[in-house]
């Protein structure tokens, strides 16, 4: 094993020295023609970091790919449509980002999407297990608290599960936390860091406001901000009035997170982002916390540090809900 280690170190230090990561990456977006998929694919194309952007959906991807492909930034774009083209779209992928499935309408919780999205995500996981078992899988489809466990169960059943490479995307919760905290504190949003732990639904979204550097919150601020971060998605669902949930801010958050995962794979050091992963931190099998992203996906799951009594109470209250939602996903795979 020793020569492997020194070789890996050598490679990454060369990349770090050159300052730009190797851009030989294939990223596939599954659900690429949707409200999130289209703008997220556009942002990824504009990043210039992706050599091969593969756009898969059951409808409309030839048009989306032709359109985005005309943007004069680096990387080729290919569109694949329908189940018969899915294997080709996934083949050789380093990262697969999955915003496939139905979004919420006013009055719905993310769990109300379970019946439709669980089978969509299960089907996608089955094809990924065959076509690109070594890729990093970034799950956006809701309910994330259950769809990530579903994906894990399918990969396990195929004998290809690598917990370091399966991540639920909670980046939008972090984006909302940064935005709302900066607004509340009159801080520069580019300098605000907020960790958001737990899950991605209602009160399972737990921002650690007590750890925000340079901020001073009143108790009222803490309560109001925490609630707004937890239910920020509902603001968008309500404002869109039946036309769906967050798509543009999610596209930004998803493209940002995918880029960080790619950077990690390509040897950039010190990348730390919150994401929902199989985790030993609590009794919930999956839990979001700050994670270091490295050449093999998640290389380290960090703890959440010292919590305020308010935050500790949130964690105590919400871990059982996370256990339940994960179990719902696991049972779904068992029974279908
Ligand atoms: P959308 O309905 O606009 O797009 C979904 C796309 O998925 C459609 O183009 C559809 O054709 C496609 N699709 C359906 N079944 C598929 C399959 N088997 N294979 C490939 N593609 C398939 O929905 P939108 O607004 O883009 O949302 C997508 C998902 O993302 C929803 O489940 C939503 O709840 C979730 N979401 C997650 C967030 C997060 O923070 N993790 C934030 C916002 C939304």
Image (tube, rainbow, N blue to C red):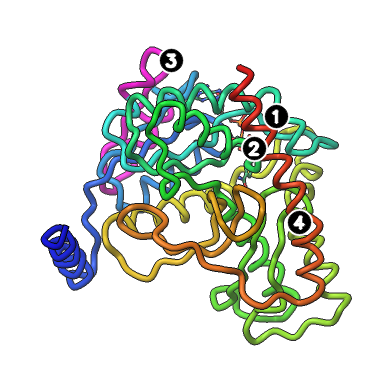
> Which circle's residue, 1 or 3, is located before the other in the chain?
3
Alpha carbons under labels 4 and 2: distance apart? 17 Å
> Which circle's residue, 3 or 4, is located before the other in the chain?
3
Asked if residue 80 lies in the magenta stretch, the reply is yes
Left or right: 224, with 150 as reference point? right
Which residue position holds label 2?
146
- Asked if disc 4 and disc 1 are in contact, CB closer than 8 Å, the reply is no
Q: Residue at x 69, y 84 (%)?
A: 215
Above or below, 314 against 245 in this view is below
**Residue 70 visible somewhere in the drawing:** no
Q: Ligand 1: does it lie within 8 Å of the C-beta at label 3? A: yes
Return the mark for residue 114. Answer: 1
Q: Front-most of 153 and 168?
A: 153
Quadrant in which residue 97 is drawn = top left
The quadrant where ligand 1 appears is top right
Return the mark for residue 83. Answer: 3
Alpha carbons under labels 1 and 3: distance apart? 21 Å
Q: Secondary structure at mark 1?
A: helix
Residue farthest along the top direction in this orientation: 84
> Which circle's residue, 1 or 2, is located before the other in the chain?
1
Alpha carbons under labels 3 and 4: distance apart? 35 Å
Residue interval drawn in magenta: 64-88
Q: Residue at x 32, y 39 (%)?
A: 134
Above or below, 8 against 192 in this view is above
- Asked if disc 4 and disc 2 are in contact, CB closer than 8 Å, the reply is no
Return the mark for residue 230. Answer: 4
Q: Secondary structure at mark 3?
A: helix
Left or right: 265, with 305 as reference point? left
Measuring from the top left, give residue 46's x and y in whole percent.
37, 50
């Amino acid at each position: 094993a020793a020569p492997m280690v020194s070789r890996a170190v050598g490679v990454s230090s060369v990349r770090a020295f050159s300052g730009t990561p190797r851009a030989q990456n294939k990223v596939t977006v599954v659900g690429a023609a949707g409200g999130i998929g289209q703008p997220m694919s556009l942002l990824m194309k504009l990043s210039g970091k992706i050599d091969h952007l593969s756009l898969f959906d059951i409808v409309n991807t030839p048009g989306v790919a032709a359109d985005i492909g005309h943007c004069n930034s680096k990387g080729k774009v290919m569109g694949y449509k329908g189940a018969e083209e899915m294997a080709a779209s996934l083949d050789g992928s380093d990262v697969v980002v999955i915003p496939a499935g139905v979004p919420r309408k006013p009055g719905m919780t993310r769990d109300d999407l379970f019946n439709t999205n669980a089978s969509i995500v299960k089907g996608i996981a089955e094809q990924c297990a065959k076509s690109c078992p070594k890729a990093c899988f970034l799950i956006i489809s809701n309910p994330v608290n259950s769809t990530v466990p579903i994906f894990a169960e399918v990969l396990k059943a195929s004998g290809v599960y690598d917990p370091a490479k399966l991540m639920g995307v909670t980046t939008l919760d972090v984006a909302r936390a940064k935005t709302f905290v900066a607004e509340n504190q009159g801080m520069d949003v580019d300098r605000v860091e907020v960790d958001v732990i737990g899950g991605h639904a209602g009160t399972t979204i737990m921002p650690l406001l007590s750890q925000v550097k340079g901020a001073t919150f009143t108790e009222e601020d803490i309560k109001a901000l925490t609630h707004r971060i937890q239910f920020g998605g509902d603001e968008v669902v309500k404002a869109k009035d039946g036309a769906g949930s967050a798509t543009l801010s999610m596209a930004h958050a998803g493209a940002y997170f995918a880029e960080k995962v790619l950077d990690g794979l390509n040897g950039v050091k010190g990348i730390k982002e919150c994401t929902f992963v199989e985790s030993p931190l609590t009794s919930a099998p999956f839990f979001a916390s700050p994670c270091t992203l490295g050449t093999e996906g998640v290389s380290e799951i960090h703890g959440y540090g010292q919590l305020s009594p308010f935050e500790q109470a949130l964690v105590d209250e919400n871990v059982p809900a996370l256990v339940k939602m994960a179990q719902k996903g696991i049972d779904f795979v068992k029974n279908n």
